[in-house]
Amino acid sequence: MTPTRTPDRFEERLLAELRQIVAERPAPAPDHRARRARPARLAAAGGGVAVASAAVAAVVVSGGTAPAAYAVDARPDGRVVVHVRSLRDAAGLQRELRAAGVPAVVDYATTAPDGCAAPRTGAATSGGGATSAGPRAGSTSGRSAGARGARAGDRRDGPRLEVGVERGDGPRLERHGDGPGTAERGGPGRPAPTKTRVDGDGATLTIDASAVPAGQRVWITTSSGRVQSLSIAVGSRRPAPPCSPPEAG
Amino acid sequence: MRPDELPRIAHDPAAFEAFYREHVEAVQRFVARRVADPSLVADLTSEVFLAAIDAAPSYRRGRGAPVAWLFGIARNVVSAERRRAGRERRAHVRFQGRRLLDADDVVRMQERIDAAARARELHGALAELPEDERAVLELVALDDLSPSAAADVLGIRPVAARVRLHRARTRLRRRLADAPTTTRSMEA
């Protein structure tokens, strides 16, 4: 592998990006598709509530006879469609998504009270697209200073649409999981890498992994611990859920 | 890189770099034999390596040499691009290798593309062959692989590749009887 000519600069830049992607990938799982519940490490890191829900998930899954909590379908066009029926086996779903090439983090833990974000008045999140409704009043991060966002349809009984402006990444359209509907996320000039549809049977998430910017992750989280509030976000940090998850819907 | 080391490229940056440096030129040429736009060559080159990173953990030695495996991925990426281009005119921009291009890179990319002009002409001429025959002929005539290496890329037995190659050549010769200029580039 002695290069006989100076590599193009394009090749070097591409190599640098790809190396970074490789470095961020998880080490190979010893056994994929184990039906045994394995509490997600990230869930455990989320605090007491997280540990509790992971334990509940373990109990439910080890029952064994319940229908599959999720189905992952890698389409020939490169998109990955996930149908989630119940919030069990986050680690298994994460593993399958990563095997399908999606840099996913699945965390069904509802965030501890001091980690949520109260309704936003227009402050932007940083970190490239974390979902959050409302100002980060309870946030300890102090990252909330930013451009003003516009919000429409902020009702408790229907979808909420929100446009926030983020540093360097353009506006994003967001919807929070408080009722049936469809949400697409993306910035200008870039297709939405993810899409969510909630129906009576659960939530269907469509992910175009190739449209996820390098180094960012696809976060699958829930604000209320119910499938109907499942949300999907693209960013480098875990999105903060709203403090009071909407109950109507 | 030894075949048994290949799965490591998915999570070991140093192993990936060795693999990348070994094959990046071949992948760019492979793409340039099929696509004439520098930006698209850059996009597809990055996609091929991204797909290789994703697929590496499931690589099996029976699947052939790493380069054959990689060309198989490149074939899939380029055909997916064709299907997509026909369907939605790249509404889904993939991992954008093109944003890494500067003006000098485009010039070099263009040279690579120009050098592959006749290959693309041949690639176009193959369009009407049945897919299984076309795939073998493409890899042998366009990418200069041996029939057994082409069999590795396609995951078929070498004897099947030879049979398809023979049929493809016969069919093509018959079809090109009226078009001597294309026949010449075929012999090249």
Image: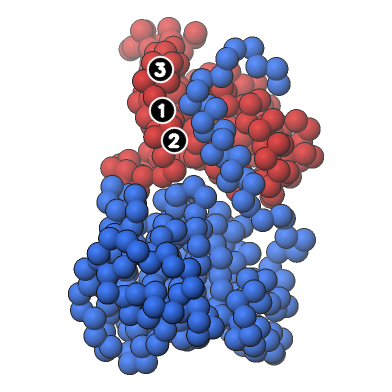
Chain colours: A blue, B red
- Whether residue A35 can be seen here: no
Q: Would you identify the image quadrant in which residue A64 lies?
A: bottom right
Tally the marks. Answer: 3
The N terminus of chain B, quarter of image: top right
- Are there few (<14), some (14-19), or many (20+) residues within 10 Å of tag 3? few
Q: Residue at x 32, y 90 (%)?
A: A249
Tag 1 and tag 2, C-beta contact below 8 Å: yes
| Nearer-N-terminus badge (2/3) | 2
Callout 3: helix, strand or loop?
helix
Where is mark 3, residue-wise? Answer: B104
B15 relative to A150 in the view: left or right: right
Q: Which residue is mark 2?
A: B97
Q: Position of residue B56 (x, y in %)?
A: 66, 45
Q: Amino acid at mark 1?
A: Leu
In this rendering, would A87 be left or right of B38? right
The residue shown at (51%, 31%) is: A13
According to the picture, the residue beneath numbered tag 1 turns out to be: B101
Residues marked 1 and 2, same chain: yes
x%, y% of residue A10?
48, 26
- Element marked by disc 2: helix
- Give the quadrant of residue B81: top left
Circle 1: is it few (<14), some (14-19), or many (20+) Cα within 10 Å?
many
Residue drawn at 62 percent across, 80 percent down: A47
Q: Can you tell which of label 2 and label 3 is closer to the viewer?
A: 3
